[in-house]
Image (cartoon, rainbow, N blue to C red):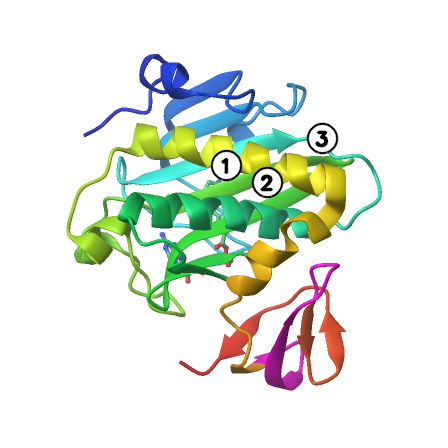
Amino acid sequence: MDSLSPEVVEPLLTGRFGRPYVYAEQCESTQTLLDRSGPEGSVAVADEQTGGRGRLGRAWEAPAGTSILCSVLLRPPPGPDLAQLSLVGGLAAAETVEEELGLWRSSQIKWPNDVMINRRKVAGVLAEAREGIVALGTGINVNQTRDQLPRDARQPVASLRTTDGREHDRAVLLADLLARLERFYTAWLEGGLDAVFGDLGSRDFLRGRRITVDGVEGVAEGIDREGRLLVAGRAIDSGEVGYER
Ligand code: BT5
């Protein structure tokens, strides 16, 4: 198994995200392992979570040593809707995944927090805010075999390995993810969602699909400049999307 220990990952870091770097072989969730009193860019990483979290009380499942499971501490200024940060995190994960696969522009963002490749979910992002401090969690399926991916998923899932048949170095991927997240987050801080809007629009998985969300049914029209999903003349802040495959 490749290692995500500090001795391996820290030399690969290129920016301020990832410092300090806290690693645990096993924890309940990196979202709670993260020290909320740390500086912006602090990171918690684990090889295994016993209570990995998705949104709305759901679980994130990954066998030990197969995935990237990380949480980053962000201290954004008050104001903008923090839900936008899950889109910012999604962009960083999307770029990381497709760069590694060598398939530029192949990954998409399924609003509000999924990263898709070949119509399969390969990563998920969870932004949890308390008192203005955000724990931005990212789970990327890296080296799971098909048998190791969750079966009860509500949509098809993939790992990098099931996509290209190769095993991938998680430490390199993690350092890349943190560098990209820092870049997207800084752009967002300076220019809001507008600053990353082009990237988002070109990766919008739902646009043009018939969906249901929040009791509304219709064809998704895209993501607006506040990060809301536009459907049937309404702008949806958050919710669970059902879509036609
Ligand atoms: C997410 O939630 O997609 C956000 C997942 C965030 C996970 C990271 S891991 C590091 C950090 N620490 C944590 O405790 N969490 C974050 P959601 O959209 O609610 O998706 C959850 C649903 O995806 C589950 O109900 C399953 O159906 C499915 N699922 C579970 N594990 C999966 C996996 N490894 N790959 C793809 N889908 C999965």
Residue 210: x percent and y percent? 53, 85
Relative to the observer, which residue lies in front, 89 or 46? 89
Does residue 104 sit above or below 10 in this rendering? below
* SS for dot 2: helix
For disc 3, the neighbor class at 10 Å (few under 14, some 14 to 19, many from 20) is some
From the image, tell me which residue sits under label 1: 180
Q: Within 8 Å: ligand 1 and the Cβ of disc 1?
A: no
Disc 1 vs disc 2: Cβ atoms closer than 8 Å?
Answer: yes
Quadrant of the rendered image containing residue 107: bottom left
Tell whether position 43 is magenta.
no
Quadrant of the rendered image containing residue 197: bottom right
Would residue 239 appear left or right of 170 to someone viewing this image? right
Does residue 179 sit above or below 158 in this rendering? above
Say which label, 1 or 3, has the lower sequence index.
Answer: 3
The residues tagged by marks 1 and 2 sit, at their Cα atoms, a distance apart of: 6 Å
Say which label, 3 or 2, has the lower sequence index.
Answer: 3
Q: Residue drawn 49% across and 47% down?
A: 53
The residues tagged by marks 3 and 2 sit, at their Cα atoms, a distance apart of: 14 Å
Would residue 221 appear left or right of 139 to someone viewing this image? right
Q: Which kind of residue does numbered mark 2 sit on?
A: Phe
Q: Which kind of residue does numbered mark 1 sit on?
A: Arg
Q: Residue drawn 59% across and 22% down?
A: 35
Q: Which kind of residue does numbered mark 3 sit on?
A: Arg
- Residues in magenta, as a range: 212-228
Quadrant of the rendered image containing residue 227: bottom right
Image mark for residue 65: none
From the image, tell me which residue sits under label 2: 184
* SS for dot 3: loop
Residue 170: x percent and y percent? 30, 33
From the image, tell me which residue sits under label 3: 75
